[in-house]
Amino acid sequence: MNINTSRTAHYAIKAYVLLCALMVIHTPLLAQNTSKIPLPSNLEQGYPRLYITESEKKDLQKTIQKEPWAKAVLEGVHQRIDQHVKRHINDPEWMVSRLQMHWKTKATNIYVEGINYSHADGEAPVPTVRFVGSRDYTTPYGKPKLEDILPYMDDPRGLYLPNRSKEGHPFEWAEPSKTGRIIYSINEEIIGLARDAAFVHWLENEKEYAQFSFDIFHTYMEGMSYRSEPIDLLNGHIQTLVGFTNFQVIHEHVLIYIAELYDFLHPYIEANYPQHIAMYDTTIKRWTDQIIKNGVPQNNWNLHQAKIILKAAMVLKSNEFYEDNKGREYYIDYILNLTSGRQWSLTKFLDYGYDKENGVWAECPGYSIGVTKDLTNFIEDFNNTFDHNILPYMPVMEKAVRMLPQYLFPNGQTVAFGDSYYGPLSTEPMSDMIRIAQKNNNKELEADFTALYRLFADDKQAEQKRNPKANINSFFASKPLEINTKYKKGNIEDYITQTFYAPNVSWHVQRMGSGKNGMMVSLNASLGNHMHANGINLELYGKGFVQGADPGKGAGYLQPIYLEYYSQFPAHNTVMVDGVSSYTEMLSYHAFDLMGQYPKSGQKDGYYPDITYSDVYFLEPETRSDQSRLVSIVKTGEETGYYVDIFRSKKQRQGDKFHDYYYHNLGQSMKIMDADGNALALTPSEEMAFAGGHLYALDYMWDKKSVKLEDDYQAEWKIDMPEGEEDIFMNLWMKGTQGREVFSIKSPPNKAFKGNHGLPYEVDKAPYLTLAARQHGAAWEHPFVSVYEPYTSGEGKSIRKISSFEDENGNKEFVGIKITHKSGREDMVFSSANHQKVTYKGMATNATYTLIGNEKNGDWVIFVGNGKEVVAKGYSISAKETGNVVLKEQDGKLLLHNEVPVTITHKNSAKQFSTGAIRKIVLE
């Protein structure tokens, strides 16, 4: 098999595995309140009913007359549809003929082959609705303007579309499978116009608008009534996902348009075409049943399906009107309380996805925050529609909204591992909770979430006032949020903690401070949905920016660059073994074990604030390798601090070829130097490549240069800010060792930053500058030992010199670092992988992590992470069980925080201390 054939087969397998996992999350969590949610009572019987009733029409008309925004919305709707409505009077075929239908073949059966449309057969007595071209929306073809669409387009050559990849965008015939979602988009646009016309007819009683709307609606719905469920010729996972118009039932949004149209047009249909109502209702029910039958119940799909089902159900009559007793109440009860294979009740859905202890939804941050927002939107919408509050039946939601600030870096951007983006935290979940509280007169709930909301929203106005869109939904959107000024802004420290651990997504964060001088490191493995194959991945903050940033998803989930690069180890700040480390991205089950941390996750007080650490273990499954990563933040001043990163990696069955430590940092330039700051002589290298049986990801990287060395070395990234602003730097020092090779690499652009990210260059287009350190052989006794220091051009570095030292007893699994600061401070870092006692110049410890810090003024700190013994500064601290201990002398007084009982010996005097928060102690 040649390389190209191998690559094609590999990609096909990857794509299939991805499709089987897409949008699914992991094992169930503890059950919440599973009480049945009662149905709303006193359901409206007339039409319309979704957003407004007939009795409320006059109030809306008055609003339009009095309120400029409402008048502008209506004018915008008229501007969009009037030309089409007027044309329809004399040319009723123009718009209808542009619907994407099987006009000639009248096919009833749709066949797909995996993610692509294949063909159609069967014959109905009327034209039928076409199915979308592909699940992969990436296509060189563009959606034509309505006037450029060929009328009654049903040609064996496919669709006549503009090719955007060619100069001048010439029109040409395209196979449906190559056209992405264009078929669906055209129909959605036309149905949207018909919906707007139905609303205008209801509001203004102009018959021509009703006729325009009805002709489109009837043609589409009659055609849909003959359509059957698409059949996957591969008999694969796609068969469980398809709707009537789309490869994914969650994208059947046109059914919402249909429901809205039907709602406003129903009185007209009753008066003029009552014979069709039974067919319309049956079609809506079949469509809704398809959405219930297919999909994915364990993640955000379940909620997106429920939102579509709710709108469709609302325009149906009550249960007793149908022979099968499946009417409005049936479908509402289904999404609230009933569970089937691929559509779960809301309570089961919440039980499965949320960790009720910490409120984290089990997907990557972008999706997790989105699910919480969608759920509060749903609760608030349900409350407004039915005057029925279901929040008490979903108790985890309060915790889920309160925890959202834990996702934030000190600059206010959210973490972005997996398929996520950096950006501000959405305030919608908070404002939804306030609205729900206000509507239900829950003062305690209102005060609680107003305090949180005001941390992120403008004090002077609840929400930025924007001109509403020229969309009928703007008339029924929530009114601007009114904040009760007696409820004050909260304290951010009530919502974020120095460490936070979410085991259901294998994510741990350490943070100190806020703003430019804050510090934060985020570690994640791959547990849950929309995750990448990234091992123990690191995101690193420094001087106002997430400098060591995750790369984003880069492209669509089915695109080769996503499958082969952005979702793989080399795109992340991690360690890859033998060039082959990988596992299934998207839905992933590879968590790290948290071996140690300080302080405890969620702890708000009672600890020493200037040092944090985490120690995690990960089993890399592809090569069966043990990986351990210890990361620590050390704050040395108001504006200064550094990170320690010690990454150990080895194969369980030996035979290690090499281990590669990747670190990507923002900036327009990167320098690799020796310990004294002299540029290293790197030469072009082809060693880090697919050739040799390694990951395809390596061939997406370019301009690779390397040098072999045993001495310490450093790298420096520079964010070159505009004239007059301080430049931003990240300095990385790494301990040299036998068998080390250092690479300078250009990687594909970071695609995780959107909008106003504050960076002075086009991050999404520039190469992502990367350092890779290769350890030939195992990297356990020769680990990757790093010290990161962010700084600015105005401040300069705070660290003067870094060097390493060895255990005097010869422990090969020990690392020692001496860090000398310009302030005169000196830090001694000890790290042992085997808990053997190590000694250096009168200091001794057996901990995973020990830091002995000495200030110039005589103050000092002894920090012990996961240890039993330390000897330093004339003190001996011992414990019977492994744990964390901090002893600090400041201004001649001792402070102690011990998470385990300890005995402290000083000058031949010993004293025992029970576990306790940080406090002053006296030994003599």
Image: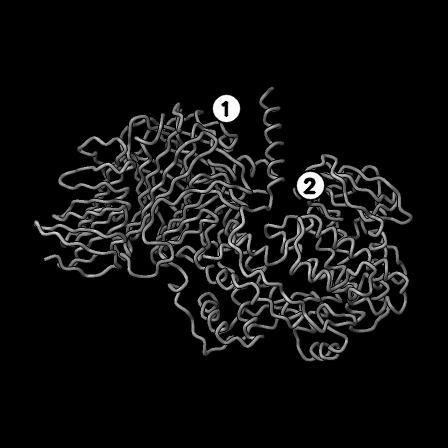
Tell me the number on the disc at residue 693.
1
Residue furthest to the left: 907
Q: Is residue 166 left or right of residue 521?
A: right
Q: Nearer the viewer, residue 612 or 465?
A: 612
* N-terminal label among 2 and 1: 2
Q: Position of residue 218 (x, y in %)?
A: 85, 58
Q: Position of residue 720 (x, y in %)?
A: 39, 47
Rate crowding at label 1 as few (under 14), some (14 to 19) or many (20 or more) other CA atoms within 10 Å. Answer: few
Q: Secondary structure at mark 2?
A: helix
Type of residue at label 1? Answer: Gly
Type of residue at label 2? Answer: Ile
Residue at screen point 84% across, 52% down: 225
Q: Secondary structure at mark 1?
A: loop
Q: Note whether 846 is above or below 912 in the view shown.
A: above
Residue at screen point 62% across, 24% down: 5
Residue at screen point 50% across, 71% down: 445
Q: Position of residue 440 (x, y in %)?
A: 57, 75
Residue at screen point 27% across, 40% down: 831
| Residue 168 visible, this orientation | no
* Residue of label 2: 238
Quadrant (top left, top right, bottom left, bottom right) of the N terminus: top right
Rate crowding at label 2 as few (under 14), some (14 to 19) or many (20 or more) other CA atoms within 10 Å. Answer: many
Q: Is residue 28 left or right of residue 544?
A: right
Instruction: Find the distance from the CA under tag 2 to the CA under tag 1.
Output: 32 Å
Q: Nearer the viewer, residue 782 or 594?
A: 594
Q: Nearer the viewer, residue 283 or 62?
A: 283
Of tags 2 and 1, the one toward the viewer is 2
Q: Position of residue 185 (x, y in %)?
A: 73, 51
